[in-house]
Image: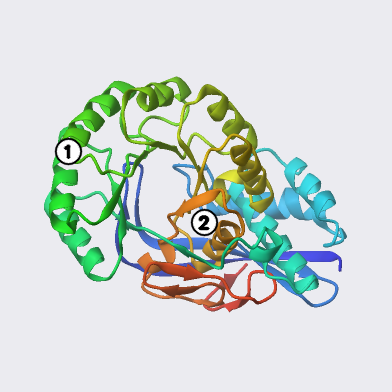
């Protein structure tokens, strides 16, 4: 089975309400759908959302990287030779991790179809279902409290609370969310690089005194500030999750060596796909560091790839894969099933995706 072409197209999906973090506000999902074509007629599905504030990628840069650099290197390669394809993909251009991720998951999809195996089984087959949290966007304390109350009423046990825009207001936000969600709700805190190390320590000590049950705090400091991340980790009781600080296996190795974080958040758009994500899993497992499976603002397509990895590997102990739940429509046929907070993979070859409706192909 030889790679003969790569098609790209734009998919736009409305959200139930704007998604707000310390880094950006998203009104609707706009993402690039990728189809890797072969000489057998089979195709593999991938996706790359532009997330300039985190990965630096735009729709134009993703399209350009695939058409100008990635496809010329992959054209004519055999799908069964995954290692050859991965080396060609990695060396096709520097960075451009979202473009690489889309093509990588599409090739894995083809590999699974070729061998009639679902990817979660290829990755280890540890389970076939995972639980996701639900994100509460950063807004006024009152609006966040209302959103938290609604989420709990819908059956979500775990809430991911976005903060990082105003330290004083962040404390009010967390108090309002806890009051609305109740003591039984599991709260995760995500500052999206919004604090300095000193601010993070001060804020977390105040929050811990009021609410000692916060499960974790994610990326409290700027991505490049490994020393600051370590300072926070050493100074607070709440476990620290590294997100934007970790793109590559090398980043994971450095953070673990520094003891700068308690957990590592793996996102396929940061790692450049499943192959590097698997390497991060292996590094973390060696050092007994648990991993967290996250996503950008993505459709069910690439979240299906993330869910297959999370189901395959036991080192991934928690998930934030709620972006399809935040969408008001689901144009993806097949893939994971979503029942409230529960995401389940199916025993269909590859990603188990049959198609995507509404794509405007280039």
Q: Nearer the viewer, mark 2 or mark 1?
A: 1
Does the image show residue 248? no
275 in relation to 323, above or below: above
The residue nearer to you, when weighing 29 against 161, is 161
Residue 146: image location, x then y, percent:
15, 60
Residue 87: image location, x then y, percent:
80, 45
Where disc 2 sits, the SS reads: loop
Q: Quadrant of residue 10?
A: bottom right
Q: In the drawing, does residue 230 fall left or right of residue 146? A: right
355 in relation to 152, above or below: below
Q: In the drawing, does residue 26 fall left or right of residue 349? A: left
Q: Are marks 2 and 1 in contact (CB under 8 Å)?
A: no
Q: Which mark is residue 49?
A: 2
Check disc 2: other Cα within 10 Å, few if <14, some if 14-19, many if 20+.
Answer: many
192 in relation to 36, above or below: above
Residue 200: image location, x then y, percent:
29, 28
In the image, what residue occupies the spot 57% across and 64% down?
Answer: 127
The residue tagged 1 is 171
Where disc 1 sits, the SS reads: helix
Q: Give how far apart the Cα atoms at labels 2 and 1 are.
A: 32 Å
The residue nearer to you, when weighing 138 against 279, is 279
Does the image show residue 323? yes
Q: Quadrant of the N terminus?
A: bottom right
Check disc 1: other Cα within 10 Å, few if <14, some if 14-19, many if 20+.
Answer: some
342 in relation to 320, above or below: below
Q: Quadrant of residue 45?
A: bottom right
In the image, what residue occupies the spot 25% across and 32% down?
Answer: 204
Q: Quadrant of residue 163?
A: top left
Q: Quadrant of the C terminus?
A: bottom right
């Amino acid at each position: 089975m030889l790679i003969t072409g790569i098609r790209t197209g734009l998919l736009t999906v409305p959200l139930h309400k704007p998604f707000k973090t310390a880094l950006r506000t998203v009104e609707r999902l706009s993402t690039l759908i990728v189809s890797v074509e072969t000489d057998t007629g089979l195709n593999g599905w991938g996706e790359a959302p532009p997330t300039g504030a985190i990965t630096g990628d735009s729709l134009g840069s993703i399209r350009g990287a695939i058409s100008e650099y990635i496809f010329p290197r992959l054209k004519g390669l055999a799908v069964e030779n995954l290692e050859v394809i991965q080396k060609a993909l990695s060396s096709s251009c520097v960075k451009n991790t979202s473009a690489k991720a889309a093509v990588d998951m599409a090739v894995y999809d083809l590999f699974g179809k070729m061998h009639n195996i679902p990817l979660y089984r290829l990755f280890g087959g540890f389970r076939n279902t995972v639980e996701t949290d639900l994100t509460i966007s950063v807004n006024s304390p009152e609006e966040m409290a209302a959103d938290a109350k609604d989420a709990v009423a819908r059956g979500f046990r775990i809430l991911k609370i976005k903060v990082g825009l105003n330290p004083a207001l962040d404390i009010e936000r967390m108090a309002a969310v806890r009051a609305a969600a109740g003591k039984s709700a599991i709260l995760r805190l995500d500052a999206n690089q919004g604090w300095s190390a000193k601010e993070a320590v001060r804020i977390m000590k105040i929050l811990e005194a009021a609410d000692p049950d916060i499960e974790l705090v994610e990326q409290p400091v700027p991505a490049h500030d490994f020393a600051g991340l370590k300072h926070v980790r050493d100074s607070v009781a709440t476990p620290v999750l590294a997100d934007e600080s970790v793109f590559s296996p090398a980043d994971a190795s450095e953070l673990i060596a520094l003891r700068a974080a308690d957990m590592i958040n793996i996102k396929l758009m940061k790692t450049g796909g499943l192959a590097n994500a698997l390497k991060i899993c292996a590094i973390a497992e060696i050092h007994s560091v648990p991993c967290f499976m996250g996503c950008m603002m993505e459709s069910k397509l690439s979240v299906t790839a993330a869910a297959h990895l999370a189901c395959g590997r036991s080192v991934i102990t928690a998930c934030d894969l709620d972006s399809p739940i935040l969408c008001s429509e689901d144009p993806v046929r097949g893939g994971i099933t979503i029942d409230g907070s529960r995401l389940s993979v199916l025993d269909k070859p590859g990603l188990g995706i049959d198609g995507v409706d509404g794509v405007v192909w280039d």
